[in-house]
Amino acid sequence: MSMDKSAADAYVYSKASGMLAKSFIGSRAVQLYNVHTLQELWSLLFTKNVPVVPETLLAKALETEARNKFIADYKTLLGNYAEPSPVLISLLHFYDYENVKDIGASLFFKEPSLPDVVDISPYNFIQYKKWPNIAAMTAKSPLSWYNTVPLLSEQQKNDYKIDSQYIEEIWESVHKIHSACRAAVINLFTQKIRIDNVLWALRLRIYYNMEKEEIIENLAYATDTRRTSSPLVHEAVKVLDWAVDDYSQWKNWKYASLLNPHEEGVIWNIDPRWIYNVHRKQYVQKALRLFHQYPFTECPLLCWYIIKQNELDNIRTASESLRLHIQVSEVAHV
């Protein structure tokens, strides 16, 4: 049952705190990587009996069960608000945007059934019951332009546009926060999107040998205006001019703490994977601090989402490492 905002803020903070205390986060995350089989991982996470299925199917079932529980718990907490803050709903909309990518691909390949979409009802803007009519599914939504089945050659461009729209929605919604946590949340998301852009720029440059101007066109902007001075992209644009094997150009960077270690006399190349892992850890640690810093605002639920989504990522990584028989040291980032 929904409550007025002050009562909902207090109740959600209390409930979310209790849920985090039982979560596999912080030092407890190591437990996810200490099990030896998928069956053990399932028993660690859930009270349901372990499905009697082959390993590949069990890994998929485990990851789906964990994702669905994460979404269900978040929706339960969100449901305490009569009028949730827009940013709390925008976080969930991530799944609508991702679902549309899968739907477009499924329709192109003429698959008979709706793909395994993430159910965020009643907060969805995609009308999944209208399958397979893509125009009806996206009508009156931010993705109403996605009204025809894309060709295979169009899907990458469409996916980029979808990702950009999600960034725009998040950016607009964090600026609609009116409580004490507004500045802190804006700063949290600004840095997250900024580093994501740096990582994307580096990956396009290192792994795909893409030219600077083309990379700039593929960065995430908060509006349709592609200004390289935007606070979300200027760091990414700046580092495109730096040699990826010259530490002297990077050592005084604003985010030098994210860089892979440099040893004098040893060949060094920037490592996007290292940056990603360090930043992800810092991002979650900031969310944990903000969770308690602004207890009676929308901040705890927003931070709960970030923290629990990271837990979900670790569950997926642990599951995949067990399925593929990969050493824990190669995959664990906790």
Image (cartoon, rainbow, N blue to C red):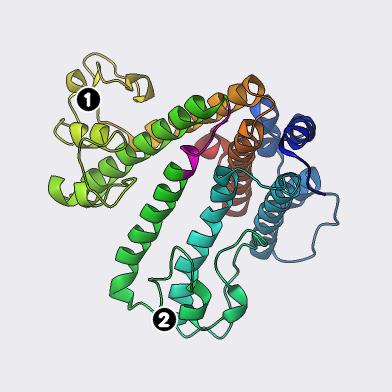
**Residue at the image point whose x is 43% and y is 66% from the top:** 143
- 101 shown above or below 87: below
Q: Amino acid type of disc 2?
A: Phe
Q: Which residue is mark 2?
A: 108
Q: Is residue 10 left or right of residue 32?
A: right
Q: Label 1, on which residue?
A: 267
* Amino acid type at image mark 1: Ile
Residue 48 image offset from top left, x and y in percent: 85, 55
Alpha carbon separation for disc pair 2 and 1: 46 Å
Q: Are marks 2 and 1 in contact (CB under 8 Å)?
A: no
In front of the other: 198 or 296: 296
| 83 to 286, vertically: above or below | below
The magenta segment is 173-179
- Specify few, some or many for label 1: CA neighbours under 10 Å numbering under 14, 14-19, or 20 or more: few
Question: Taking the image as drawn, is residue 244 in sight?
Answer: no
Residue in view at x 65 percent, y 63 percent: 119
| Image quadrant assignment for residue 242 | top left
* Residue at 23% across, 22% down: 250
Rendered residue at 55%/30% (across/down):
284
Q: Position of residue 317 (x, y in %)?
A: 57, 45
Q: Does the rendering let one see residue 48?
A: yes
Q: Position of residue 285 (x, y in %)?
A: 56, 25
Quarter of the image for the C terminus: give it: top right
Task: Check disc 1 and report its element: helix, strand or loop.
Answer: loop
